[in-house]
Amino acid sequence: MVKKTYPIIAREGWPFLIASIAISAFAFNICTLWSIPLWIISLFILQFFRDPKRNTPSKKNIVVSAADGKVIVIEKCKDDYLNRRAIKVSVFMNVFNVHSNKSPVKSTVMNKWYFPGKFLNAALSKASLENERCALHLKTKEGFDITCVQIAGLIARRILCYVNKGEVLEVGERYGFIRFGSRVDLYLPINSKIKVSLGEKVFNGETIIAELKK
């Protein structure tokens, strides 16, 4: 197992957390009772932006989850990004899940697409095609193609993707973040062996989603 270490609190949350604590402390000095809801909000922000370390499996030709959350879709469909038949596995993140995104495979970023769009409930199937999203085409050295798509949700208003075409990612490497509820779709080769089931809770960089088959 290869251990990936990240800050306990994601850097994306620092401005929110500092501002929230400062406002809560100011309110506490004025009125202890009034400050209680603000401290609760600070605690929510703290848990939302947590980014715990994960143990990433080192087994060859596996796909790990790019997101924390619940598996809501496992289906054969068309991957419009690469114009192919694929198996789609979708993971829905609610506001209580970790929202950093990790690379599902060791790969090279072959392409990147960003699409502005709506902010429908990310659990809806049409969110994959209508919501704001950012997609990556990842290719492994064995020649497997994976499409990894960050999708904004009803509350989410910011997709952050820190990699670009030509960059190399390690499996389990942190590459992005989505604020306040969303989903990630993985489009896998059609003959992949799926290792998760609908409704299963998964963890980014750790849970094995599928095995890739030649």
Image (spheres, grey):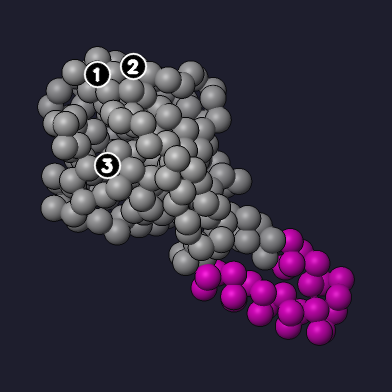
**Residue type pointed to by label 2:** Lys
Which stretch appears magenta? 14-40
Q: Which of marks 2 and 3 is nearer the N terminus?
A: 3
Q: Which label is found at residue 193?
A: 2
Answer whether residue 56 is visible to the viewer in this image. yes
- Kindly indicate whether the residue at mark 1 contacts the one at mark 2 (C-beta within 8 angstroms): yes
Q: Residue at 47% across / 56% down in the picture? A: 5
- Residue drawn where x is 13% and y is 53% of the image: 166
Whole-percent x and y of residue 46?
Answer: 63, 61
Q: Is 3 displayed left or right of 96 in the figure?
A: left
Q: Name the residue under label 1.
A: 213
Indicate yes or no whether the magenta region holds residue 61.
no
The N terminus, quarter of image: top left
Where is 43 relative to 141, above or below?
A: below
Kindly tell me whether residue 155 is visible in this rendering. Answer: no
Q: Does the magenta stretch include residue 35?
A: yes
Q: Where is residue 208 in the image (x, y as percent from the top left)?
A: 43, 29
Frontmost residue, 106 versus 16: 106
The residue that label 3 is drawn on is: 106
Q: Which of 166 and 149 is in front in this view?
A: 166
Query: Looking at the image, is mark 2 or mark 1 earlier in the sequence?
Result: 2
Predominant secondary structure, magenta span = helix
Left or right side of 92 for 193: left
Q: What element carries label 1?
A: loop
Tell me the element at label 3: loop
Q: Looking at the picture, how far across and down is residue 167, in whole percent?
A: 18, 54
Q: Is residue 148 above or below residue 188?
A: below
Residue with the most extreme front position: 1
